[in-house]
Image (spheres, rainbow, N blue to C red):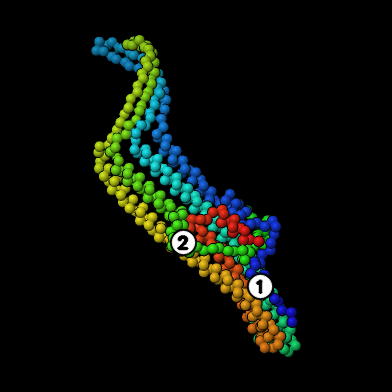
Amino acid sequence: MNLFRISPALLMAGLISSNANALDLLQAYEQARLYDAIYMTAISRYEAARLDLPLAKSANRPSLTAGLGLQHKDDTFNSNDDTTLSNDSRAGELSVDLDQNLYDRSTNYDIESAGYSVDIAELQLGIAKEELIVTTVVLYLNVLAALDNQTLAERERTAIEKQLDLATQRLNVGLGTKTDQFDARARFEGANAELIAAQNDVVNTQQELEALMGQRFQADPKQEMRPLDNDKVTFELVEGDAWVEKVLQRNRNYQISQRQINLQEVEVARSIDTRIPSFGLFAGARYVESTATTLTSGGDSQNWLVGIRGSMPLYLGGSIKLRQTRAGHAYNAAEYDSEQARRDTDRLIRAARRGVQALQRQVQALKEAVTAGRSALEAKEEGFKAGVTTNLDVLDAQRDLFRAGRDYLQVSYNLVNAIVILERASGQLDDKDLKRINSWLK
């Protein structure tokens, strides 16, 4: 009796063929970084925002303005004795004005606010990069999982088909029953349906990864992609509240909430210092040339001026007090938002750590379940040869083994995704993590 056997090593090491020229995770990420519209938008927004600081600082630099004016004037005067006097004149003016801010607290606050805004933009770009890393890992592993599921479905169908043939042969020689054949036929058709669904899932996940990278696979993804080596997936968890508090400070969303508080602190200080005067230096030069008329002889003139001007708001319709009150409320809101962000981040880190811990135990348990399932199948096959067990028992054992193998592979992918989520929540997800995950591939 030649029954289909499945190796536990095959189940536990990944089922996708290895290829020396395969598309690895780093290559997929690099391609996505060049093509993904969401990430490119984040870069453009960052590049725009980082100009806010030099723009704010430019207010403390001198400004130079040049002016040019041409004037044509025609005056006509009619007296009571019917005498008419006309005056037709032309004049040209060239001016240069220089302004230099000497002291303006508002400008200083603009510079300080711009600095925090640039920090926020940089953190938001970091979040976009983290999101791209997470998305790349998830979509890459989704394709691997779909391919593994398809391979397992194909092998399960083959195993059931062999059992169906055996049941038919036994029925023909009078050793089997119609029930055994019907059971095997039902299992075979069910395996066919699962294989169709698995093949469709491969296409869907493949297209999602292709859309992220902006390019299509040149060959069968089984040959292009590198499978996961489950035995290489290792991650050491750090316990303790001190670690959570430490990594919480690195979480970019929490850091943004802190910068929002800083921004509101600047606005509070600005509202308090509204009545502080500002001073500036001004200088100018003008050259005017005019033509001769009936009333003037014409000529030119030069004017030079230099001075210091100052201003101080005294009353702005009651808006000074209103702005102070508004700034106080906005600051309180920013503090509440930051506290909520701290709580959410703390909860997210702890939940992600528990998730990794639970999945590590699941991986080990399912690995043992695959080994136990193979032993159970072998025992059922031997029992079937001896007439102790039925064909249905063998089919059940095959089904249980394949399901255990499928669950083991899926949980292995879930563990990698959970590690990425934990690293992101703790503010530690970067290219080094991507390289480490890539080293887990065959």
Residue 141 visible in image = yes
Counting other residues with Cα less than 10 Å from the Cα at mark 1, is it few (<14), some (14-19), or many (20 or more)? some
Q: Please identify the quarter of the rendering in which residue 308 is found.
A: top left
Is residue 141 placed above or below 177 in the rendered structure? above
Viewer can see residue 184 = no
SS for dot 2: helix
- Residue at mark 2: 349
Q: Which residue in the rendered view is the most extreme toward the bottom?
A: 174
Q: Which x, y percent locates residue 185? A: 66, 80
Residue displayed at 68% across by 74% down: 6
What is the spatial separation of the Cα atoms under label 1 and label 2, in whole angstroms?
35 Å
Which residue shows up at 65% across the image and 70% down it? Answer: 11
- Horizontal and vertical percent position of residue 161: 69, 77
Tag 2: amino acid:
Ile
Q: Give the quadrant of the N terminus.
A: bottom right
Dot placed on the residue nearer the N-terminal end, 1 or 2: 1
- Classify mark 1: helix, strand or loop: helix
Point out the image quarter for the C terminus. Answer: bottom right
- Tell which of 216 and 296 is nearer to you: 216
Residue 398 vs 234, above or below: the answer is below
According to the image, label 1 marks what residue? 8
Classify residue 88 as left or right of residue 250: left
Residue 398, quarter of the rendered image: bottom right
Looking at the image, which residue is at 60% across and 72% down?
367
Disc sitting over residue 293 in the figure: none
